[in-house]
Image: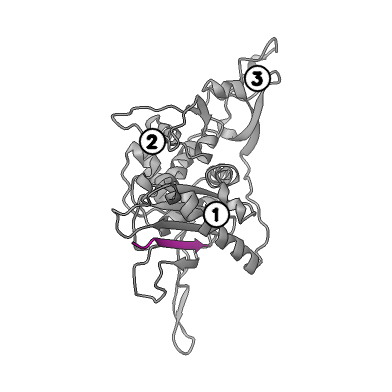
Amino acid sequence: MTIQTGFVVIDPTNGEIRAMVGGQNQNFGRGLNHVTGIKRQPGSAFKPFAFAVAIDNGYSPAFTLLNQKFNFNGWSPDNANADYSGYMTLRQGLANSINVIAGRLTIGGIAPPNQVVKFARRMGIKSELAPYPSIALGTSEVTPLELTSAYGTIANNGVHFTPISILRIEDKNGIVIADFLPEYKEALNSQTAAILTDMMQDVVNYGTGAGIRRYFHRPAAGKTGTTQDFADAWFVGFTPQLVGGVWVGFDDHRIKFTNWYGQGAKAALPIWAKFMEKAYKELDLPLKYFNLPSGVEAVNFCVETLELGDSRIAGTNCPDVITDLVMNKYMPQECELHKHGVQIKPEDKKGDIGW
Ligand SMILES: [Zn+2]
């Protein structure tokens, strides 16, 4: 049984397909195109859509959820490493691809399944998506092209461009017969896109996608995906200039990888990372960073409140703080645990907003 791969690279700022490898057979019209012609479960590579909803609903990456198993109407996902703990931030949950954290987003009303479907559609997923809580773990099948294109929405500050491979058709005299203009729409709030991008940078800087750093050192963000019993391995990632998606698996759905080498980080990620290293070198692309738009700011959180499952902005007396991003329209309340003797004037007290 041959291992198959689909790989596509798109310019997220205009939707133009820059590279596509649909399979071994390079002759057009021969063989299956594994970018456009297959539908597979994305697994954890779908998690960013659930996190996008959570952030858009006003939850900071420093918001915490219990890293413990749950049973929701018979649905009880496991963590891949069977490792559980106390409260964990959304940022850590995405970076380390913790299933129960993603699951708690959809069962807890933080990212309701209907809303996840709506967001994924707007961002570029065309395939049917089932609005069940398990959608957070990527149980609905998608094509590599649509998944990559939807990640491009995150890379492009929330604006989605429909993928386009043909720009113009001319006759033999160079007369233009047809012109294809990119179609785009604002799919995601730019603040939400920026915070999600920031979290997805941690995936490749210290999380499950850290393997890209063996090859590629520019600012980048992404997510790994591995489906049940290692049937499919995914890595989808982006820089400010390019978004690329890799699927590795088998044409026969019954065939699976036999072991850990079927993980997205092992089977799919190196293809992405080696391509990006080469493409940046050969095309001599300028160094670009991801930007934070106005309305997003970095604030200090009180670590003790995070560990208690009630993330609060740190006051001057909080002993231990971490910095994370918030949308300033959803500013969390201040820590009440460590305000010792500090006079709080009533007019300084913030209203009970968001969470
Ligand atoms: Zn405190």
Residue count near mark 2 (Cα–Cα under 10 Å), binned few <14, some 14–19, many ≥20: many
Is-magenta flag for residue 2? yes
Q: Residue furthest top?
A: 341
Whether ligand 1 has any atom under 8 Å from the Cβ at mark 2 is answered as: no
Which-is-in-front pick, marks 2 and 3? 2
Q: How far apart are marks 1 and 3 (CA)?
A: 41 Å
Q: In which quarter of the image is the N terminus?
A: bottom left
Residue count near mark 1 (Cα–Cα under 10 Å), binned few <14, some 14–19, many ≥20: many
Name the foreground residue: 183 vs 288.
288
| Secondary structure state at the residue bearing disc 3 | helix
Residue at the image point whose x is 60% and y is 45% from the top: 205
Task: Kindly indicate the quadrant of the structure image that contains residue 156.
Answer: bottom right
Q: State the residue position of label 3.
A: 348
Point out which mark residue 144 bears: none
Name the foreground residue: 301 vs 176.
301
Q: Is residue 219 above or below residue 312?
A: below
Residue flagged by tag 3: what amino acid is it? Asp
Is 6 displayed left or right of 332 in the figure? left
Point out which mark residue 238 bears: 1
In magenta, the rendered stretch is 1-10
Name the foreground residue: 86 vs 331.
86
First along the sequence among labels 1 and 2: 2
Q: Residue furthest bottom?
A: 173
Residue 170, given in percent of the width and then of the height, sits at 45, 82
Q: How far apart are marks 2 and 3 (CA)?
A: 33 Å
Residue flagged by tag 2: what amino acid is it? Pro
Which-is-in-front pick, marks 1 and 3? 1
Q: State the residue position of label 2.
A: 112
